[in-house]
Image (tube, helix red, strand yellow):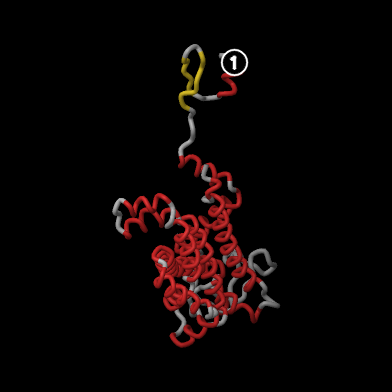
Amino acid sequence: MAPSDKAILGSADLTVVGGMPSIESVTRPNAVTMLVRRILGHRSFMVAAVIMTGLILTAVFAPFLAPHDPLDQDLTRRLIPPVWSERGQWEYLLGTDMMGRDYLSRLIYGAQVSLLIGFCAMMISGVLGTVLGVCAGYFGGRVDMAITFLLTTRLTLPVVMVSLALVAVVGGSLQTVIIILGCLLWDRFTVVMRSATMQIRNLDYVRAASAIGCSTRRIIFSEILPNVAGSLLVIATFEIAHSVLLEAALSFLGLGVQPPTPSWGLMVSEGKDYMLFEPYLVMLPGLAIFVLVLAINLLGDGARDIFAPENRN
């Protein structure tokens, strides 16, 4: 074989048959290696992953990172500006609020509240929506009609208005907000899972599993759910961001997480009266909400690109 032929074939394993070289096998990266390459090659996904990792670590290790107790009040130290201002103090890097509480500590602990509500509400809505969507798409007929009617009824109800009404009746608390949001945000899961299941149920491998006598439970959990996991992941990230924004809106209106619990939406609400004189009271928690929601949405967009069928080969 000429040197130029070897250069073209690269790392291929060669054998000689009848005096002519033939390719016996070509080294190809396995599925895990290809997935890692796609993830590392997606810049926005990696940036979002770094931001989310930092926020999650901040929330988990909040007791060790926060310089002060977020609930400690000292009226003699109220409205100290951030350290970059003329009256700033290094003891309070991001200043204090109107009650003299350290703002950096409240922001750090606020990450716990936002992430907890976002993930828990997504889990509740995800389970409800996925079960309803898969059942509607797989069984069809009357089951599909009943679930579609339930979905249509849910879509006629504005989430924000219903949340405000329920929280006003039941009372605002962390647990109440999680349950209400989880029970109201299942519609997107249902729509996507229903559509994806209806496409998959007629494919050859699902029909083959049914023909050899696999139970309905086995078909759903072994054949359908693994193949809709990519779509499910994208919707999950979107609903986490949606839950974070709704919690911030409810807390801003005074019907979400109740004081003195540090919540970013509640911090914006408490600082709005001082916005013209101490803008950091609104800007800092607002920026935190923006960064969290942006990172979650970038993760969802990146996951959609990475797990898209055309990018798997």
Residue at 56%, 14% in the rendered image: 1
In front of the other: 261 or 210:
210
In front of the other: 68 or 223:
223
- Image position, residue 48 (x, y; %): 57, 55
- Image position, residue 220 (x, y; %): 37, 58
Q: Is residue 301 above or below residue 40?
A: below
Tag 1: Cα neighbours inside 10 Å, few (<14), some, or many (≥20)?
few
- Image position, residue 214 (x, y; %): 30, 54
Give the quarter of the image for residue 229. bottom left
Residue sitting at the far bottom? 169
Residue at 51%, 50% in the rendered image: 307
Q: Is residue 213 above or below residue 38?
A: below
Residue at 60%, 61% in the rendered image: 294
Q: Is residue 238 above or below residue 96?
A: above
The reply to whether residue 71 is in sight is no
Looking at the image, residue 12 sits to the left or right of residue 88; the answer is left
The reply to whether residue 197 is in sight is yes
- Residue annotated with mark 1: 3
* Count of numbered circles in the view: 1
